[in-house]
């Protein structure tokens, strides 16, 4: 059975610019922290997988540590990060609920087409699970979201670009790696997918368009929809021939393409 596995942030919705960044800054303000990330600052932070990990990077700045009164004790720092991250998750979910984060074009259409055609569809993200579920439901609707298993948060010990999250999805759902297509938006996600031996389609966004995507089977500006302008095909190394927008046949044509490492036996 073919499978489609989608990342959340930047794939299901344009969450980074319109969700995570304002949620981080609102959290910093609420906790009285002497920092505010600009769009350019946050673009650099995206090289770090995971929200808590991005906030933890602030501890590398002695001026921030001193001004924020960050304790030296590692356990205390972990608790501090957990408190900040709870606030950030709540702020993010409020933005989703308010409709402030636009779903990316074509996601609801392609997910529904895949499910109706008998594909297994899942979401794999290293963001907080409750945030991912909120974005998924907003992007595809509650009824469709209920048919899509979510793998997110701290279910694996290492964040993308480590392939652990995709290995977990494959193992848990019993997927054939050659028959499973990942949709990602960033280089970290692409490396995680191909590191797990999975072909990857990349839908870029403003933060990731400049990133190398040498390992991707297909790179497009977006999945697209019939009522939108035609998509831009940036890279095509497979058998797909997208027209105005990406359709399920294009996804199927990406399957079986070269995709990085293969575990022994080829499937899990």
Image (cartoon, rainbow, N blue to C red):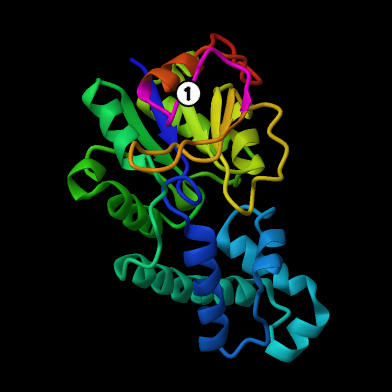
Q: Quadrant of residue 209?
A: top right
Main secondary structure type of the part rendered in magenta? loop
Q: For mark 1, what is the residue?
A: 242
The foreground one among 40 and 174 is 40
Q: Is 79 drawn above or below residue 190 in the view shown?
A: below
Over which residues does the magenta segment extend? 235-248
- Quadrant the N terminus occupies: top left
Q: Position of residue 179 (x, y in %)?
A: 44, 15
The foreground one among 16 and 33 is 16
Q: Residue at x 65, y 80 (%)?
A: 36
The foreground one among 35 and 230 is 230
Q: Is residue 151 left or right of residue 211?
A: left
The foreground one among 89 and 77 is 89
Q: Is 139 drawn above or below residue 36 in the view shown?
A: above
Residue most extreme to the left: 143
User: Badge 1: how crowded within 10 Å, few (<14), some, or many (20+)?
Assistant: many
Q: Is 255 drawn above or below residue 77 in the view shown?
A: above
Q: Residue at x 39, y 58 (%)?
A: 102
Number of numbered discs overlaid on the protein picture: 1
Q: Residue at x 42, y 32 (%)?
A: 5
Q: Disc 1 on helix, strand or loop? A: loop
Q: Position of residue 127 (x, y in %)?
A: 49, 54
The answer to if 246 sits in the magenta stretch is yes
Q: Is 100 drawn above or below residue 213 in the view shown?
A: below
Q: Quadrant of residue 74?
A: bottom right
Q: Position of residue 145 (x, y in %)?
A: 25, 44
The answer to if 254 sits in the magenta stretch is no
């Amino acid at each position: 059975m073919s499978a489609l596995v989608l990342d959340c942030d930047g794939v299901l919705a344009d969450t980074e610019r319109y969700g995570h960044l304002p949620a981080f800054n609102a959290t910093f303000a609420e906790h009285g922290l002497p920092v505010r990330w600009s769009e350019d600052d946050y673009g650099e932070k995206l090289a770090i997988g995971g929200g808590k990990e991005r906030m933890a990077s602030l501890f590398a700045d002695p001026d921030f540590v001193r001004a924020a009164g960050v304790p030296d004790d590692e356990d205390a720092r972990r608790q501090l990060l957990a408190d900040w991250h709870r606030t950030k998750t709540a702020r993010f979910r409020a933005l989703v609920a308010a409709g402030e984060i636009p779903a990316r074009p074509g996601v609801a259409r392609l997910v529904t087409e895949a499910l109706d055609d008998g594909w297994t569809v899942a979401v794999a993200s290293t963001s907080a699970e409750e945030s991912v579920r909120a974005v998924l439901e907003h992007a595809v609707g509650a009824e469709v979201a209920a048919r899509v298993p979510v793998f997110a948060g701290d279910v694996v010990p290492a964040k993308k670009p480590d392939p652990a999250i995709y290995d977990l999805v494959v193992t848990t759902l019993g997927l054939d790696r050659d028959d499973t297509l990942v949709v990602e938006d960033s280089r970290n996600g692409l490396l995680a997918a191909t590191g797990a031996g999975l072909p990857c389609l990349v839908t870029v966004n403003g933060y990731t368009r400049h990133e190398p995507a040498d390992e991707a089977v297909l790179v497009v500006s977006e999945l697209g929809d019939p009522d939108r302008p035609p998509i831009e095909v940036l890279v095509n190394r497979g058998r797909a021939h997208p027209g105005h927008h990406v359709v399920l046949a294009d996804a199927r044509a990406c399957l079986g393409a070269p995709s990085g490492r293969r575990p022994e036996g080829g499937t899990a």
